[in-house]
Image (cartoon, rainbow, N blue to C red):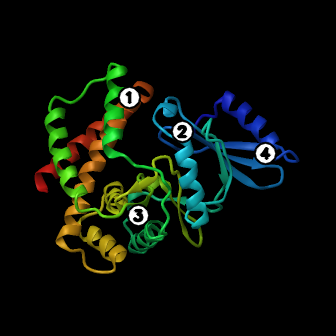
Amino acid sequence: MMKIELSDKKNIEKLAQTIFPVNSVISLTRLGGLTNRSYCVLMDSSKQYVFRLPGEGTEELINRQYEKISTVLACKLGIDTDLLYFCDKTGIKISRYIENARTMSPNTMRKRENILAVADLLKTLHKCDFNTGVPFEFFQMVNGYEDFIKSNNGSFYEDYHDVNRQVMQIKNETDKGISTLVPCHNDPLCENWICDDSRMYLIDWEYAGMNDPFWDLADVSIEAQMNDEMDAKLLSCYLGHKPMEDEKFRFMANKIYLDFLWSLWGKTRTPFDGHLMEQYALNRYIRLKQNLLSI
């Protein structure tokens, strides 16, 4: 069981008195998460909520106003659970706890029925015909992460500049063929997919914004460690037809962009989270270079 921070307990109890004035906190259970601290909070009304407290350093990298816009949209679409409170200044969020929730893992995500559910949910999001106005600026994010790493005396990999050049060349080429950007989650790792007894949810919209829909599809594949056959099933279910060569290329290209960007993100988290994030960044960087050879 993860440790409950005393300061978090006090802050949650204080906020709960404001949001739920007629109820009291009975218990707190720490939930998982890479950067934020989240708690399942049981009230004396027998209702349970999730309180999300932002992690150290996230205020420099996450635009909470943008996150709120995308979270509200996801709730309206029935993709995420009910949102009860969101402070775009502090980043604190309260949502309804999903009963009998099962967090997806690579093993469960690779099951046929879950591949189908994921494809359907992403279609609902991507085809909602709504412009959130929230940008997902790949190049800007790369520059921001690079600046953060430099300002915190971090280091880059020895061949980083050569890899950067290759990635940017592919990105510039593929962007020419993308006519429409759609609302995307942009971080659909397995832990952000929750299943209850009847349906699938996609949670945590910190990095959401208008993007190429193949980004989300490629991210699901990477995080679930899907093989070629599973990739083909995911794409076919999503597209409604067997993927064409240009669609396969966009899919693979987005795998490269993902690992490039999130390897840099891992580097930005190293000052706060140490070796765990350093290894996370390295693993993604190694896979990125492998995929560069295959595209």
- Viewer-proximal residue among 202 and 45: 202
- Kind of residue sitting beneath label 2: Asn
According to the picture, the residue beneath numbered tag 3 turns out to be 109
Instruction: Classify mark 4: helix, strand or loop.
Output: helix
Mark 3: few/some/many CA within 10 Å (<14, 14-19, 20+): many
Where 254 falls versus 109 (above or below)? Answer: above
Marks 4, 2: nearer the viewer: 4
Marks 3, 2: nearer the viewer: 2
Q: Position of residue 126 (x, y in %)?
A: 43, 66
Give whichever of discs 4 and 2 has the lower sequence position.
4
What residue lies at 16% left-to-right and 47% top-to-bottom?
A: 169
Q: What is the spatial separation of the Cα atoms under label 4 and label 2, in whole angstroms?
A: 21 Å
Where 277 falls versus 193 (above or below)? Answer: above
What residue lies at 60% left-to-right and 61% top-to-bottom?
A: 75
Marks 3, 4: nearer the viewer: 4
Q: What is the spatial separation of the Cα atoms under label 3 and label 1, in whole angstroms?
A: 28 Å
Give whichever of discs 3 and 4 has the lower sequence position.
4
According to the picture, the residue beneath numbered tag 1 turns out to be 270
Where 194 falls versus 171 (above or below)? Answer: below
Q: What is the spatial separation of the Cα atoms under label 1 and label 4, in whole angstroms?
A: 35 Å
Numbered label attached to residue 19: 4
What residue lies at 72% left-to-right and 37% top-to-bottom?
A: 12
Marks 1, 4: nearer the viewer: 4
Are the residues at dot 3 and dot 2 in contact (C-beta closer than 8 Å)? no
